Each structure stands twice: as structure tokens, then as C-alpha cells.
Image (tube, rainbow, N blue to C red):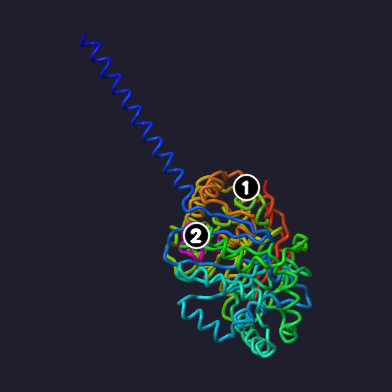
Amino acid sequence: MALRVLGVTQNMRSFMRGVDMIKRYKSAATLQKTLLNIPATQVTKLDNGLRVASEDSGASTATVGLWIDAGSRSENEKNNGVAHFLEHMAFKGTAKRSQTDLELEVENLGAHLNAYTSREQTVFYAKCLSKDVPKAVEILADIIQNSKLGEAEIARERSVILREMQEVESNLQEVVFDHLHATAYQGTPLGQTILGPTKNIQSIGKSDLTDYIQTHYKASRIVLAAAGGVKHDDLVKLACNSLGGLEASVLPAEITPCRFTGSEVRVRDDSLPLAHVAIAVEGCGWTDQDNIPLMVANTLVGAWDRSQGGGANNASNLARASAEDNLCHSFQSFNTCYKDTGLWGIYFVCDPLQCEDMLYNVQSEWMRLCTMVTEAEVERAKNLLKTNMLLQLDGTTPICEDIGRQILCYNRRIPLHELEQRIDAVSVGNVRDVAMKYIYDRCPAVAAVGPVENLPDYNRIRSSMYWLRV
């Protein structure tokens, strides 16, 4: 009897433990599901093809914007600079709002209105209180559909843009990257600058701006994105009311193929104290399966400047060499993606006499990526990449930007857990494979500005893109 009671008690305990485990499993499953889906990114496509995407975090503020699939890549030699010019004209008044009325309305809301142009996208966005989202959407819709484009305003903005071009010319990093695109994609739209040449800015008129809007500002090429305290259903209604009248594009947007050319451009200026150098190989587009391994490889090379500590304790080999041997003032690796191509490389600033040594260490590190990168290094880079991605999504504006860009690039927003899994799936073999594919024995594009006499000539740079070892 005692045995039977004991057996029943043990069975009951086992049963209760099982129930408890089931409860815990269900709780864990629910928690997992909650983490995966809150806050979810909701996407709705309107009848005219315009996409509405939002993430509701319940915050008291929100960022809402229009992401347009058109930038300087959509221009030709004659109208290069018109997309950026149009961005400037957006806040200069509409059919129902003068420039003063627009500025006062935004100021009274306590909102921030901004815009920027890249090589493939034009963006107009506003940051405001969540209760003011309807007004912000209405203002943004008014801006892209009803801008006055007055002759007086065009003349005034022309001088503003010319001054901006002078300011950009003093930012040597911008100058180097413009040269890098010009030589890497010479003769193609990606080789053009975003601001355009001076002669174009001086001649762009209302007809050029109107033609660009009518050609590229189609509903199917526009995403209304929002993040923060915003209800998706309400945002869809606002989009229908304010943007439902936009014309749908009959034909899909054409992508002009942009051929990569291994080449160089050097602007020697011995009056500058430091040499600014960028070297890159052709990378891949946004949707290419090699993009994630290339991002890991890019993170592995890393970034460094003299203000950072570490010295001999830096995890990055290149950062350690730079600190110990005083090779450079700073460097940063980059992985710039476009629809069908990209630039994967490094930009560094160094003393004139260190150009050769720094470049030697850069290319040695690239060859090591192709042949000898270790599993521990790849794991560290993967963890750092995941951390950086999460840190970049701190606030409604970067989240809204992430939504708009990803909807244009991927036609969906990749959930963070999926992105994390794709990064975790990258192995040391994957990194070596993409490095061999994109870096090893490839012709690089080189851009250098400043006292670059000691930078090796292109043939020597090219010969260091492979190792001959026995």
C-alpha cells in the first residue's frame, strides 16, 4: 500500500513537472512569438501601386516620410543634379502654401521637416508628435505633388546649391568618394555626382524639374513609411486621401546597367597636410546572396582612428597595425550597395610618407581574408555586425529610414530575427569564398587626393591583389 501511494505520489510529481514544463514551453513559445512580432512592420499596397509601411511602437513621437525610387542614377549628363535641385525646391512653397506659410505651419507643430538625395533615392520626411502625423502626411503629399517651382525661388536656390558645392569640395572624404564613383563607374549614371556639375546647376530650369517629377515621381516608385506612435490603418487612410491621386506607372522603372571599371584617379595637392585615399573592388547589389557575407567581411576589417584607445589590444589586425606602427590617422571599411552592383573597400587618411605602408597593410589584410581568416575572427565580426545593426535602429527616424529603404530595395522589410539568423549562418568558409570571388585577383578602383606622391602606381596596386606563394 505504501508502495502504491509512493508510486502515485511519484507519478503525480512527474505529471506536475510535465504540466509545469508544458506551461513553461508555452510561455517561452508565446514570448518568442511576441519578440518576433512586436512591433510588426505592416505593409499595404494602394490601388495606384504606392506602398504604405509602418511600425507602431506606441511612442509619443513619430517619423513619417516619402521614399522615392529616384536619385542621381535616374539622371543623364544633361540634367545631372536635377534630383538634388528638386529636393531644395520642395520647401519653397506649394500651390496652397507659400514658403512662409509652410515654415510657420511646421514650426507651430514643433515638427522637423527634412530631405536628402542619394544616388538611387530621394527622401522627404518629418518628425513630429504622434497626434500630428495626419498633418505631416498632408504636408509631405502637398510638397511632392504641388510644388510651385517659381522662377524667383529657382534662381535663389541655384546660388544656394553653388555655395553648397563649394562646401562639399572642402570635405575631402566626400570629394574622394565622388572621384571613386567617377572612376569606378565611368561613363555611367552611377559615376555622376549627386549635386551635378556647375554648368548644369546654372542652366536647370522649371521645365527640367517638372519633367523629372512627371517621369519619376510615380506611385509605384514611392513608399510612405512611418515609425513611432502611428496606427497603420489610419496611415493607409491618410495615404488614400493625400496620395491616392498619384499616377501609377504603366512600365516598371528601368535600371541602366552601370559597368565597373578597375581604374584610378589621383588629384595631387601638396598643400594639403594629409593624403586621403579610397580603394575598392566591385561588390554586390542589395538583393544578392553574397551581401551578408560581404557585410561580415567588411565588419572584420573594421574602422579605427587615433582618438580610440586599444593599441596592441585591438581585435582588428589592421587597427592593431595602424596603432602600433603609426600607419594612418584613421581608416574605415565600407560596403556600399546599389540595385545591381556595389563598392566594397576602405578609405584611409594618412601622412604622405605612410601611403605605401598603409596600402601594403590594407592589401595584406584583404589577401588574408581570402586565404587565412579564422573562425574566431568571423564570430567576433558577426557579433559586432549584429550589435551595430541594433544600435543603428535607436529612435523613430532611423527605424523609419530602415523601413523606407528596405521596402524600396527588397519590396519587404527583413525582420531582425531573420537578419540575425542569416548573419549567424555565415561561416568562415563563406567569408573566404566571397573574398576570393570579389577581392582576389580583381582590378580595384582607386581615388586619392592630397600629397599622394608616395602612393604606389596602379600596376603595383593591381599586382598586390593576389599572392604567389610556394
Quadrant (top left/top right/bottom left/bottom right) for the N terminus: top left
Mark seen at residue 107: none
- The reply to whether the magenta stretch includes residue 397 is yes
Q: Quadrant of residue 20?
A: top left
Q: Nearer the viewer, mark 1 or mark 2?
A: 2
Amino acid beneath label 1:
Arg
Mark 2 residue crowding within 10 angstroms, few (<14) / some (14–19) / many (20+): some
How far is the residue under mark 1 from the one under mark 2?
45 Å
- Residue ID at (53%, 58%): 232
- Residue ID at (67%, 90%): 152
Residue linked to disc 2: 231
Amino acid beneath label 2:
Lys
Residue linked to disc 1: 432
Examine the residues drawn in magenta and state their main secondary structure.
helix
Q: Number of marks in the image?
A: 2
Q: Quadrant of residue 222?
A: bottom right
Give the magenta-colored segment's residue range: 388-402
Q: Are marks 1 and 2 in contact (CB under 8 Å)?
A: no
Can residue 211 be seen at all in this image of the molecule? yes
SS for callout 2: loop
| Viewer-side residue, 22 vs 229 | 229
